[in-house]
Image (cartoon, rainbow, N blue to C red):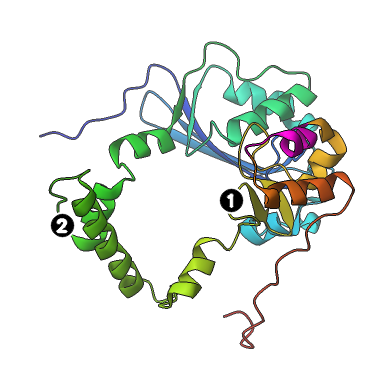
Amino acid sequence: MAPRRLQLERPLIVFDLETTGRDVVKDRVVEISCVKLNPDGSREVKTRRVNPEMPISPEATQIHGIADADVLNEPTFVQLAKSLFDFLKGADLSGFNVERFDLPMLKHEFARAGLEFPPAPTAVIDTWRIYLAKEPRNLTAAYKHYCDKGLENAHSAEADAVAAADILEAQVERYPDLPPKVSDLHEYCHQDWLDPDGRILWRGDEAVLGFGKHRDRSLRQLAADNPDYLQWIVDKADFSKEVKQIVRAALAGRFPDPPPRPAPNGNGGH
């Protein structure tokens, strides 16, 4: 069978952003890379660093390796906005998980430059959604991946429980960094949780919400900008006493201490 090809009626631009942090409203772009796939089969790659006019968080630098000094002399997004907009205009868009982060971030950056993005009509293809649809992350898929077995009688309690037990044993065997002790595995699975239900999570040194419309926003930001939302959490019966205690403290200006970082291994990080 001949390989199937992506059919393009107009250019498709696959893009990715590196940013100062994870807040799509307040953070800024520090690097954008675009791969333009043209209908004639050619492709163009453009990458540009951007001065975000704000500090890059240490957690972001740790991920993408871009520090404040690296972008100090680069143009700002506003200075680049018109040429970038013209490059993107008339093309459809794609990327991995772009609809949750990269696209909203880019919309806010263009809005600050007085441009509405993306101009209609623009198709958006999120390859993360295709990945989830075609490679489901469920028990049957995990059983095949870790144990190389088909799951018979899926959704019967016994078959699912046996498969889950086999998967856990296979995971400990496969990944050397996984601790073999149950208590340590518990810590591994919940290392970013501040409460028993995972409603508040660690992101670097900041405590953030792990749910709802303000998911991934820090308690510090919410206490300053949306205290009513935090008060709603305190007043709502559905949240645990641990969550309410943390949120009450945030409303009073007291925030959780960051978790301890692993000690240096003494070999220079290599």
Q: Give the camera-side residue of 217 and 232.
A: 232
Q: Quadrant of residue 12?
A: top left
> In the rendered structure, which amino acid carries the disc numbered 2?
Lys
Q: Position of residue 199 (x, y in %)?
A: 62, 46
Which contiguous range is marked in magenta? 229-238
Q: How many neighbours does mark 2 have within 10 angstroms: few (below 14), some (14-19), or many (20 or more)?
A: few
Does the stretch in magenta take in 191? no
Can you tell which mark lies on residue 198? 1
- Residue 92 vertical position relative to residue 247 in the rendered view, above or below: above
* N-terminal label among 2 and 1: 2
User: Dot 1: what SS?
Assistant: loop
* Res 39 quadrant in image: top left
- Say which residue label 2 marks: 149
Residue in the image at 43% along x and 73% along y? 182
Camera-nearest label, 2 or 1: 1
The local crowd at label 1, few if under 14, some if 14 to 19, many if 20 or more residues have their Cα within 10 Å, is some
Q: Looking at the magenta stretch, what is its main secondary structure?
A: helix
Q: How many marks?
A: 2
Residue 231 highlighted magenta (yes or no): yes
- 68 to the left or right of 146: right
Please state which amino acid type lies under the numbered disc 1: Gly
Which residue shows up at 64% across the image and 21% down it? 86
